[in-house]
Image: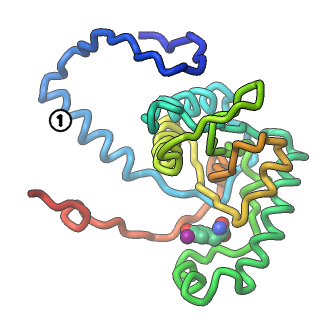
């Protein structure tokens, strides 16, 4: 099936027309093989903080954003906007504003307990990834729908919906061979100003995307094992 090119338009309360959904059932042998392969590939994903400035294929990033936008959402309201920032001047502006906020955060705003939790990762207020990575995907959540005439309609489960979409974005980028990081400068209001977003949108995360730098290092983390994260009833 090729990607849909149909344009979405806001609904007005009319029920969706049911259409048949009959995907071929995958033989369990293939299912098992795919699941094991996917598990191994996903376990290779690492959050990267040192990026090469090498450009990435635009279409890979666009396809990953399109994958993210297939996420389920509360009342199918699709409350997200992905701003793809490649312009180096805009990335510099974002880095300067983010570092200003992060400096205050690391100087004490986060509080001792939070700073202690971050210490093993060794993060600080210097955010080279915002200018080194060739692309930033700034994810905005739409708290409500804003019609062209200024009318508003509340969106539901916005945090959950956008969180799921970002998870799908990270998976798509990783499985397409690109590295990424979820960066959450706080507060993030400056992103609305720099990127000139409308009042119904609130920044959720900045996702720098690219290839790891030649000298990239990541912390030697251990993930929880399956029996530590899963309970069977
Ligand atoms: N937003 C800050 C602090 C930070 C917070 C958490 I929780 C992290 O896992 C990592 C960093 C920053 O980006 O440095």
Looking at the image, which residue sits at the far left?
233
| Residue 215 in the image, given as x and y percentages of width and height | 65, 60
Across and down, in percent, residue 131 comes to 79, 53
- 59 is higher (above) or lower (below) than 19: below
- From the viewer's perspective, is residue 187 above or below residue 157? below
Q: Which residue is more in the foreground, 9 or 151?
A: 151
What secondary structure is found at the residue carrying circle 1? helix
Query: Which residue is located at x 19 percent, y 31 percent?
Result: 31
Q: What is the residue that sits farthest to the right in this orientation?
A: 89
Quadrant occupied by the N terminus: top left
Is 51 located above or below residue 75 in the figure? below
**Figure quarter occupied by ligand 1:** bottom right
Q: Residues within 10 Å of mark 1 (few under 14, many from 20)?
A: few
| Number of marks present in the image shown | 1
- Residue drawn at x 59%, y 55% as measured from the top left: 182
Q: Nearer the viewer, residue 211 or 125?
A: 125
Res 44 visible: yes
Please indicate whether residue 58 sits to the left or right of residue 78 in the image.
Answer: right
| Residue under numbered circle 1 | 32
- Name which residue lies at 90% across and 46% down: 89
Position of 179 relative to 27 (above/below): below
């Amino acid at each position: 099936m090729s990607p849909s090119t149909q344009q979405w338009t806001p609904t007005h309360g009319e029920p969706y027309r049911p259409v048949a959904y009959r995907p071929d059932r995958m033989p369990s042998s293939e299912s098992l093989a795919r699941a094991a392969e996917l598990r191994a590939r996903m376990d290779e994903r690492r959050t990267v903080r040192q990026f090469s400035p090498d450009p990435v294929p635009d279409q890979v990033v666009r396809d990953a954003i399109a994958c993210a936008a297939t996420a389920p959402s509360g009342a199918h309201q699709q409350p997200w906007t992905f701003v793809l920032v490649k312009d180096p001047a805009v990335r510099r502006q974002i880095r300067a504003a983010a570092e200003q906020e992060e400096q205050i955060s690391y100087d004490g705003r986060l509080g001792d307990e939070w700073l202690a939790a971050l210490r093993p990762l060794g993060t600080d207020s210097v955010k080279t990834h915002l200018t080194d990575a060739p692309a930033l995907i700034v994810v905005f959540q739409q708290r409500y729908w804003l019609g062209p005439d200024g009318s508003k309609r509340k969106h539901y489960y916005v945090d959950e919906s956008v969180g799921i979409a970002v998870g799908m974005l990270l998976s798509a980028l990783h499985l397409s061979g690109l590295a990424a990081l979820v960066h959450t400068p706080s507060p993030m209001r400056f992103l609305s100003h720099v990127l000139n977003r409308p009042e119904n949108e609130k920044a959720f995360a900045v996702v720098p995307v690219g290839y790891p730098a030649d000298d990239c290092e990541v912390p030697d983390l251990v993930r929880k094992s399956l029996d530590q994260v899963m309970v069977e009833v």
